[in-house]
Image (cartoon, rainbow, N blue to C red):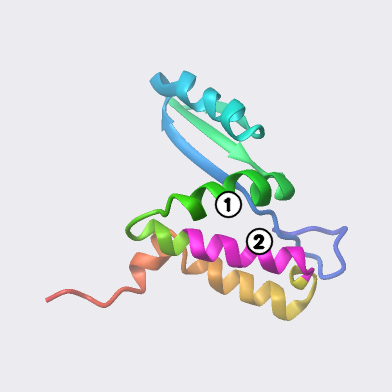
Amino acid sequence: MKSPTHKLKEGVQLEFSLTQHSRDELLMKSLIEFFNCGNVQRSNGACKYRVGNLPAMAENIIPLFKNYLILGEKSKDFSDFCKVLEMIKVNKHLTKEGLEQIRIIKAGMNTGRSKSLPAME
């Protein structure tokens, strides 16, 4: 994200989020107590549980998903998420090279990953 206050004029903001239909708001709010962090926001018929606090992610979110492995394509996104978190912990995001690495990782996550998959015949 563009940021006039950062030395490189760009900043990194890492966020863990889960989205469900608004009928599951109670479930989403229960995650706040379960993980002891985060918040829930409602928008356009959906509920989003969000955590933007890096120490909370490292201490509460990441360990759960390392103990209870994510299956399928999302496991690759989780691995990339962990890589970026580790880069931020050692301040690599404050260098031009680190920012570029993070951009590349981000571009390959979620829908970006499916674009890079070989076509099936």
Q: CA distance from mark 2 to mark 1?
A: 10 Å
Please say whether residue 29 is one of the residues in the magenta stretch.
no
Q: Nearer the viewer, residue 102 or 77?
A: 77
Quadrant holding the C terminus: bottom left
Q: Residue furthest bottom?
A: 97
Tell me how many marks there are. 2
Secondary structure under the numbered disc 1 in the rendered image: helix
Place of residue 101 in the rendered image (x, y in percent of width and height, measured from the top left): 63, 76
Res. 119 image quadrant: bottom left
First-in-chain label (2 vs 1): 1
Q: Which residues are magenta?
A: 78-91
Mark 1 lies on residue:
62
Q: Nearer the viewer, residue 13 or 45?
A: 13
Q: Main secondary structure of the magenta part?
A: helix
Residue 99, placed above or below residue 47:
below
Label pair 2/1, CB-CB below 8 angstroms: yes
Q: Nearer the viewer, residue 119 or 26?
A: 26
Q: Residue at x 75, y 78 (%)?
A: 96
Residue 16, placed above or below residue 103:
above
> What's under tag 2, amino acid-wise?
Leu
Q: Which mark is residue 85?
A: 2
Side (left or right) of 6 relative to 112: right
